[in-house]
Image (cartoon, rainbow, N blue to C red):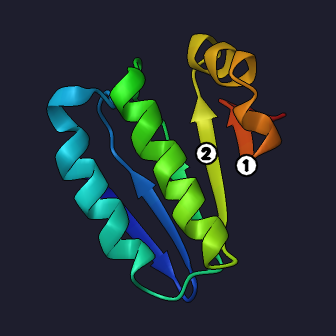
Amino acid sequence: MSEIIRDERRVTIRPGRDIVASMAGEFRTELNGEIAEELEELTIDLSDVEMVDSVGIGVIIATHNTLDQQGAKLKVINIAEDIYGLFTTMRLDRHFTIEKTGKAS
């Protein structure tokens, strides 16, 4: 179960483990529960996440798409260097904010 921090219309979710197929359903459910609220911004904090597989990326993209339809923003922070490289190669940084561990992109 992810750590969830709420601050008015902003929510930060810290899964604390790899975002892979075996946990994607649970993570998707947690995200959808937060998206159901009227948010301005949802932040996914990838501290302690070493791997995001294709299913995990799909969950993040679907979350962005839903938030975008609602006029809310997605931010993914504290991304490990190799995951950051994957996200930028896929040009996800053009759709939502991504920040490497310790510094902004």
Please give the name of the residue rendered at 65% of the width and 29% of the height, measured from the top-left corner: 101
Alpha carbon separation for disc pair 1 and 2: 8 Å
Please give the name of the residue rendered at 56% of the width and 82% of the height, measured from the top-left corner: 39
Quadrant of the drawing holding the C terminus? top right
Helix, strand or loop at disc 2?
strand
Residue 87 is situated, as x and y percent measured from the top left of the image, at 65, 24
Which numbered disc, 1 or 2, marks the residue closer to the eye? 1
Residue at the disc numbered 2: 76
13, above or below 37, in the image: above
Work out whether residue 61 or residue 31 is closer to the camera in this orientation and state it: 61
Helix, strand or loop at disc 1?
loop
- The answer to whether the residue labelled 1 contacts the one labelled 2, judged by CB atoms less than 8 Å apart, is yes
Work out whether residue 91 or residue 45 is closer to the camera in this orientation and state it: 91
Please give the name of the residue rendered at 48% of the width and 51% of the height, measured from the top-left corner: 62
Residue at the disc numbered 1: 96
Number of labels in the image equals: 2
Residue 55 is situated, as x and y percent measured from the top left of the image, at 34, 29
Q: Is residue 4 in sight in this rendering?
A: yes
The amino acid pointed to by label 1 is Phe
Residue 51 is situated, as x and y percent measured from the top left of the image, at 40, 18
56, above or below 1, in the image: above
9, above or below 10, in the image: below
The amino acid pointed to by label 2 is Val
Please give the name of the residue rendered at 62% of the width and 42% of the height, measured from the top-left corner: 77
